[in-house]
Image: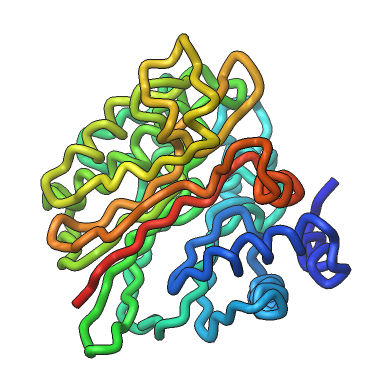
Amino acid sequence: MAGPGAALAHILAERPNTIAMAQVIARLAPDILVLSGIDYDRQAATLTAFRNQIAAEGHGFPHLFAPVPNAGMPSGHDLNDDGIRHGPDDAHGYGRYAGARALAVLSRLPIDRQHKRDFSGFLWRDLAGAKLYTGAPPQALALHRLSSTAHLELPIRLPDAATLQLLIYHAGPPAFGNHPDRNKNRNHDETAFWLRLLNDDLSLHPPRPPFVLVGGSNLDPFDGDGLNAAMRALLAHPALQDPRPASPGAAARPDPDHAGPAALDTVTWDAPVGSLRVSYVLPSADLQVVDAGVLWPRSDSGLATLLAQTGTRHKPVWVDLQLN
């Protein structure tokens, strides 16, 4: 079973799947990469090792940022009401150890850590219109964080002295655990947080454009097990634009039972779930989108073989922006 330090050991051992991941990223050659599912450690040893592996494949990221994740951080309370206070689903975000399933940013442009805003400690009960969950005890709600991994606003310094705000998050999946609606409602509200922030419905000022909302919402706008309305509302928000990144690989896997367009899917799971759109890059409405896509080729290409070697079902989503 994976535990603290396992991801770092895999990277340093140059396992084939981590090499394949580095090759995929180097092939995309992004200026800014938001990465989810990498372990956090205080000295950023895991992230630094992976950055070095990407550099060995030909693409450099001089700037790194790794926020402390809620995933695996003990809450000391029985949050999922199963009679146990120290299970993985009782942490502030699901995780079998502290630092599991973290977010990270790798960038060719400087990161302004001094002016970041970290919303990861925001309490679920403080969200306007929060769905909460059936039977939630007051003592749990007094400490239950909304974010299962992290919610942040991270300024990126542009060459012309302007700033681009990254709004980043990674929500937990809606369908897991023994509680009937806790994780489904939390998944919904993790995306709804951005709606409330953009609408100035919180005791936090909205982000100033230009900004880009980047996240794994674990929520398809139409299909899957989640409460889809929050994702549809975010995609339609006037402060944002949806570049609708597509791919030939996803388009070749239509699901007759799904309402959403197959070409926009970003991941495929086993039946009955199938392929869904759960990863997003949403620029603010003032930005000019040059191009967008999902790196998901048809199954008969060599690139498809490389992607399969990474061992992840998720495909990279990319957007090219003209920042002037």
Along the horizontal axis of the image, is 224 left or right of 72? left
Rendered view: 37 above or below 124: below
Q: Is residue 177 visible?
A: yes
At x 66%, y 79%, the residue is 55
The residue lying furthest to the top in this view is: 257
At x 47%, y 76%, the residue is 107
Rendered view: 261 above or below 36: above
Q: Quadrant of residue 25?
A: bottom right
Along the horizontal axis of the image, is 67 left or right of 13? left
Which quadrant, please, contains the C terminus?
Answer: bottom left
Rendered view: 59 above or below 198: below
Along the horizontal axis of the image, is 225 left or right of 308? left
Q: Is residue 73 visible?
A: no
Q: Return the residue nearer the eye: 19 or 98.
A: 19
Q: Return the residue nearer the eye: 30 or 93.
A: 30
At x 64%, y 39%, the residue is 313
Residue 220 in percent (x, y) is at: 40, 30
Residue 266 in percent (x, y) is at: 50, 39
Q: Return the residue nearer the eye: 299 or 29.
A: 299
At x 47%, y 21%, the residue is 224
Judging from the image, the colouring scheme is rainbow
Residue 280 in percent (x, y) is at: 39, 47
